[in-house]
Amino acid sequence: EAQVTQNPRYLITVTGKKLTVTCSQNMNHEYMSWYRQDPGLGLRQIYYSMNVEVTDKGDVPEGYKVSRKEKRNFPLILESPSPNQTSLYFCASSLVGGGQNEQFFGPGTRLTVL
Amino acid sequence: DAKTTQPPSMDCAEGRAANLPCNHSTISGNEYVYWYRQIHSQGPQYIIHGLKNNETNEMASLIITEDRKSSTLILPHATLRDTAVYYCIVSPLNRDDKIIFGKGTRLHILP
């Protein structure tokens, strides 16, 4: 089944403790992206990747890192999480480009930073 | 800033057609209009997209005005399961540009 998976689905952590949220897609998509969603603010893009070893900042990249060493994986790294990074996070992928094809979204990761 | 403008919320009676408007007055000639929806806190789901012609699929119809400055998503027979937030986005002009989603329209289907 074609899908985007994220792990973990739920995470509660403390300020400053490094964490990684994994994202994987099995559709051989070139483009992958991370979004965060907060009440009243809609979906905001954090980082995106056009292909392996190519990443770019989205609207809200501060406090996040990403890597794209393999086509299928696009982990989101929070080196020193803070409470303002408490949010619902979505990973997405599409065949090519940023908006030239439909995006497939993962189920979301709800992160709480205490 | 979002390239699109949508009403924050709308109501529609069950069984009726839901018509969701979107303004994209600064759209460029080769930018597509995409619609997604998000049910509760699930991952957004693609609905439909178009360039200049009207489009229809099993989920919805998309009507794009001739000047392309606005569009309407039509759910022909709304059901309670169509209650969701609907996002209209304009695809980036360049493939490596970021995507801006905006806040969408919260559609309530009333029984």
Image: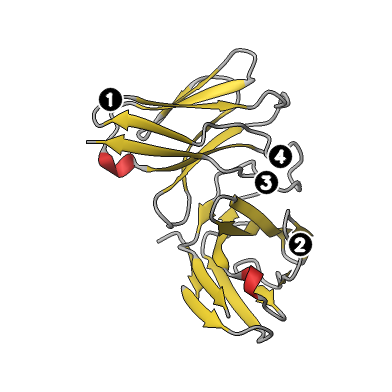
Residue where numbered disc 3 is placed: B99
Residue where numbered disc 1 is placed: B16
Q: In this view, does B21 lie to the left or right of B5?
A: left
Q: Nearer the viewer, mark 1 or mark 3?
A: 1
Is disc 3 on the same chain as disc 1?
yes
Residue where numbered disc 4 is placed: B92
Q: SS of the residue at dot 3?
A: loop
Q: Quadrant of residue A30?
A: bottom right
Q: SS of the residue at dot 1?
A: loop
Relative image position of residue A82 (x, y in whole percent): 67, 76
Seen in the picture, residue A86 relative to B41 is either above or below; the reply is below
Pointers 2 and 3 in contact (CB under 8 A)? no
Q: Nearer the viewer, mark 1 or mark 2?
A: 1
Relative image position of residue A90 (x, y in whole percent): 55, 61
Pointers 1 and 3 in contact (CB under 8 A)? no
Relative image position of residue B73 (x, y in whole percent): 46, 28
Of residues B53 and A113, which is closer to you in this image? Answer: A113
Tell me how far mark 1 sits from mark 2, CA to CA.
Answer: 44 Å
Numbered badge on residue A55 = 2
Seen in the picture, residue B103 relative to A38 is either above or below; the reply is above
Tell me how far mark 2 sits from mark 3, CA to CA.
Answer: 14 Å
Q: In this view, does B74 lie to the left or right of A20?
A: left
Q: In this view, does B80 lie to the left or right of A49?
A: left
Chain holding disc 3: B
Amino acid type for the residue under numbered disc 1: Arg
Pointers 3 and 4 in contact (CB under 8 A)? yes
